[in-house]
Image (cartoon, rainbow, N blue to C red):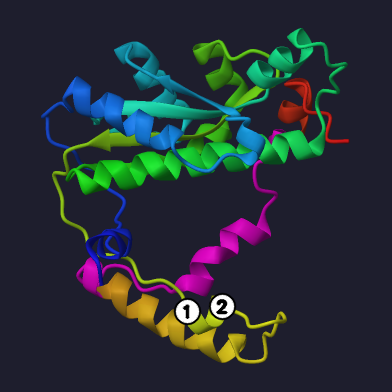
Amino acid sequence: MNPVIELLQSHRSIRKFTERKIPRELFAELIRAGQSAATSSHVQAYSVIHVVNPDNRQKIAALAGGQTYVAESSDFLVFCADMKRSTEAAERAGAEVVRGMTEQLLIASVDTALMAQNVAIAAESEGLGICYIGGIRNNPAEISDILRLPEHVYPVFGMCLGYPDQNPEVKPRLPVETILKEDYYQDEKDEGQVAHFDETMRKYYLERTGGNKETNWSEQLKPLFTTKLRPHMKDFLQGKGFKMQ
């Protein structure tokens, strides 16, 4: 493998960081690397909030589910889908803009995710660790208030950045043949492949926890499908101006 592929396949989420701070020059380069990601129609439908205020980081850590590393990492970013800047630019150029369409929401969310993943890869290439914080969406209205996010801007997820103070194993992924389909969607072998992957994950959890956690991939999925996951998001997004028409 070349070094880039090797780096990509070595990703781990880091939740313990040293007190060492990321140099500001490097931090700026990480953001520039993020901006180099693909973007739909060059819209660049994202904004990144660098949360520096310690009190705000503590508040966000609590709102995101008590994830202490939000406050402890060298830097914490909130990646926001942003259709405000581009629609206003088009309006100033003379367009009669239509706001709040579902496709605009998708464009902004995808752009944001691509940008963030570029930042993550750039950070890991420099020996840094990262952890995505999807818990931002637990309380998006409160976090939007803290960050003073306007209409047509919503927080997609956060990201902790810093120098790792742990060395976790790489978590296994589903086999390539399970997720890669040729010509058509075919799932005849999925059940058997998932069963095999469940055994792989059971062994992984047992080894990682010294025998204290015995579960598998399918078991870990159950909470996602037995409860209404973040049902507040629809009303929140509509309140942000995304009417999803």
Mark 1, other Cα within 10 Å: few <14 / some 14–19 / many ≥20: few
Quarter of the image where the N terminus is located? bottom left
Span of residues in magenta: 207-233
The residue at which mark 1 appears reads as 176
Which element is circle 2 on?
loop
Is 172 located above or below residue 121 in the figure? below
Q: Is residue 232 magenta?
A: yes
Residue at the image point whose x is 62% and y is 21% from the top: 141
Number of callouts: 2
The residue at which mark 2 appears reads as 180
Q: Which of 87 and 41 is in front in this view?
A: 41
Tell whether 22 sits left or right of 50. left
How far from the left and from the top, in percent, is residue 126?
Answer: 19, 43
Is 48 located above or below residue 128 in the figure? above
Residue at the image point whose x is 80% and y is 38% from the top: 102
How far from the left and from the top, in percent, is residue 66?
Answer: 39, 34
Is residue 67 visible to the viewer in this orientation of the structure? no
Q: Do the residues labelled 1 and 2 touch (CB within 8 Å)?
A: yes
Q: Quadrant of residue 35?
A: top left
How far from the left and from the top, in percent, is residue 76?
Answer: 34, 27
